[in-house]
Image: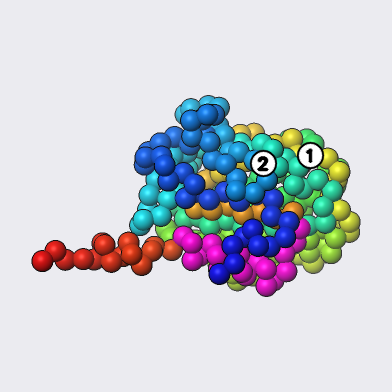
Amino acid sequence: MPAPDTIANLALWFHADDLSGHADGTAIGETGVSPWTSRAGTSTALQSTSVVRPTKQTVSGKHVVRFDGGDRLALDGTALSFSNNVGGVTILIRASLTAVADDAMLFVSLGTVDSSSRCTMYFTGGGSLQAIARRLDADGATLLPGGAAVIGSPANYSIVFDYVNTDLTNYINSSQTAQDTNFGTTGNTSATNAIAAAIGGEAAAGADITGDIYEVVVYSRALSSGERASVEDWLTSNTTESFSFRIRQNMTLR
């Protein structure tokens, strides 16, 4: 199965397997000690405040980053520039949520002011996946709710922001859950870097997820349906309990 880096315009790729050298319970995001580094671009997920760092854990033989409802990781480098003057963005995340609070954010990228979410994936208080999209920083926000969060088991959450074609679409486990085919005005995004980007929450909103993140993949363009499905298949296969782990768990000593 093709890996995410075989598809063009990969901007960010955070995989919890890259934290396998840390013991379970290790706080993630401390500079020089436990950074979570993207496999693509130059971004690192960090948290300067110790009490809001998520932890590395292992679930069914798979590594995860666990957020407790008060944790978040700030992103630097490519995470601040990938949405600069582009015609589209695609965000795909494999996560297992244990609860959903109002405005709980899986991924947020802000424009030039704190309230200007250029491309954000979060949940409403009712537990629906929701996109926030702006093409230009001065534009009003388009909010697209649709699709109930999956509680208690891993799921794929994807949003395609197609600014050029004014098409915004949400997916959960590869099924389309909402679409707006006429959001904003056509064209590329503002030619400015984001002032902030984060995984798991956003300090100004005070809305953080509760659950585990396996993998975060972001492209600086709108993927085709086939490309998106390919990455979602990768996310599912790479974060499903391994066959060898099941054998070890089910073996009876003789």
Residue drawn at point x = 75 percent, y = 61 percent:
222
Q: Quadrant of the C terminus?
A: bottom left
User: Would residue 50 be counted in the magenta stretch?
Assistant: no
Residue sitting at 74 percent across and 35 percent down? Answer: 195
Q: Please tell me whether mark 1 sits on a helix, a strand or a loop.
A: loop
Q: Quadrant of the N terminus?
A: bottom right
- The secondary structure that most of the magenta stretch takes on is helix
Task: In the rendered structure, find residue 193 and report the number of the disc placed on it.
Answer: 1
Residue 152 point in image, percent of width and height: 42, 58
The residue at the far left in this view is 254
In-front residue for pair 99/81: 81
Callout 1: 10 Å neighbours few (<14), some, many (20+)?
some
Percent coordinates x, y for residue 2 in the rendering: 59, 67
Say if the magenta span includes residue 224.
Answer: yes
Callout 2: helix, strand or loop?
Answer: loop
- Foreground: disc 1 or disc 2: 2
Residue 208 place in picture, x, y as percent: 54, 42
Residue closest to the eye, 70 or 47: 47
- Residue 187 in view (yes/no): yes
Residue 84 place in picture, x, y as percent? 81, 45
The boundaries of the magenta stretch are 221-239
Viewer can see residue 130: no
The image quarter in which residue 185 lies: bottom right
Say which residue appears at 61% left-offset and 69% top-offset. Answer: 230
Question: Disc 2 marks which amino acid?
Answer: Thr
Q: Residues within 10 Å of mark 2 (few under 14, many from 20)?
A: some
Report which residue position mark 2 lands on: 42
The disc labelled 1 sits on which kind of residue? Asn
